[in-house]
Amino acid sequence: MELSPLTAVSAIDGRYRNQVHHLDEYFSEYALMKYRVWVEIEYLLFLEKKKVIKLAVRTQKALRQLAADFGPDDAQEIKRIEATTNHDVKAVEYFIKERLEKNGGAAAREWVHFGLTSQDINNTAVPLSWKHALEYEYLPAVLNLQTALRVVADNWRDIPMLAHTHGQPASPTRLGKEIMVFVERLGNQIEQLLHIPFTGKFGGATGNFNAHHIAFPKTDWVKWGNEFVEGLGLQRQQFTTQIEHYDNLAAHFDCIKRINNILLDFCRDIWSYVSMEYFKQKTKKGEVGSSAMPHKVNPIDFENAEGNLGMANALFEHLAAKLPVSRLQRDLTDSTVLRNIGVPLAHTLLAIKSIEKGLNKLVVNDARIYQDLEDNWPVVAEAIQTVLRKENFPNPYEALKELTRGKEKIDKKAIHSFIDGLKVTAELKKRLKAITPHNYTGITASY
């Protein structure tokens, strides 16, 4: 069958194609060719700038235009050349040579890819595409999600809610603060992500500028290599084999994986709150919650997000573990793996979209949250015993434990009856009775 979203093997290129198709500008075969052509042309223009070669102004302009306007037809031309060369980077080299000849640059033909190995191109092209994908796609998406969480945290700031530790009722909290937990966690990891550098390799067949140095022994190729790579927007690794270390790329993967774990944790918490009826969900006319049970409104957005986050993390885990490991000066195992770095990012972006969609459906069920607090008066036992400790009352913890632990029903009446039986002042009894599950919510940092 002809390839289409219906016949694609991968869900990324199939069912989810319309949501992530823009990523083909960074991670498709076409995108890899585009970035390779850009690096090759920038290198040729760099040699011209350093007066190693001479290119006419019109030739330089044509090369820049080729890099800027590179499109699917150009990619098809490279594939045609590759059918003969059976080498993808060499096909890019021949493609640029053909265009160079057509634009008055025939004399500079052999300066294309001068002194380089394929990985000098791949290990600059791939980090550049990854850098642009993070800057233009991932970071805006995750920062927008963090902002959306910050907004709902503010909206839900004053809603008291029963907390649950070990799945059991615990000291009350506030709904907004619980959302701020995730806002802060995301912020911490995003900050770490922003400090991981984007690095590349550029140094010839085994990282020593062997060919460059033998041709121009008086040129400081290390300095020139640094200047060239920095001009692309990357940092050049100084001591490499044939390939880049990939350690910083792995750090990116690990950091995004941690962010995904935070989002996964959030999805499971919201899913639990929905199951506890702390949230209702807005319905959309025509949608079906269950094929068999018409009443159901399932938290599918958070479940979809959880699934996509799991897929993303499984791939990020392999990428981060595999890429920094290569036999001696290089083996080929990085090549296939690098072609898949866009897949986990696509799953991650799908998850973020799902979470945003799910957030927009949530409606706080104040009545259910209020009733859960009212049904759990034992949670004020901590407050009462702590105040009694301050007042030097003997064995307050044990007294409250005896009253509350494992008992079937402890309500407001039982708590107040206990307080009335305490040998303390009337003023202290009044203070203790003022404590309720609805107001025993502590304090948090301002936000």
Image (cartoon, rainbow, N blue to C red):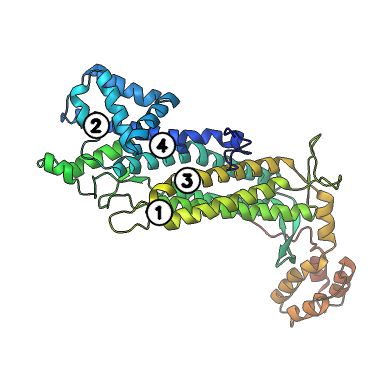
The answer to whether mark 2 and mark 1 are in CB contact below 8 A is no
For residue 237, side relative to residue 170 (left or right): left
Q: Secondary structure at mark 1?
A: loop
Looking at this view, is 115 or 432 the one in front? 115
Callout 4 amino acid: Leu
| Sequence-first tag of 2 and 4 | 4
**Residue 340 circle label:** 3
| Label drawn at residue 32 | 4
**Residue 71 seen in the figure:** yes
Q: CA distance from mark 1 to mark 3?
A: 12 Å
**Dot 4 crowding, Cα within 10 Å, few <14, some 14–19, many 20+:** many
Marks 1 and 3 in Cβ contact (< 8 Å): no
- Which of the labelled discs sits on residue 154, or is there none? none
Which amino acid is tagged 1?
A: Leu
The N terminus, quarter of image: top right
Q: Quadrant of residue 104?
A: top left
Report the residue marked by disc 1. Answer: 323
* Mark 2 to mark 4 CA distance (whole Å): 18 Å
Extreme residue in the bottom direction:
394
Residue that badge 2 annotates = 112
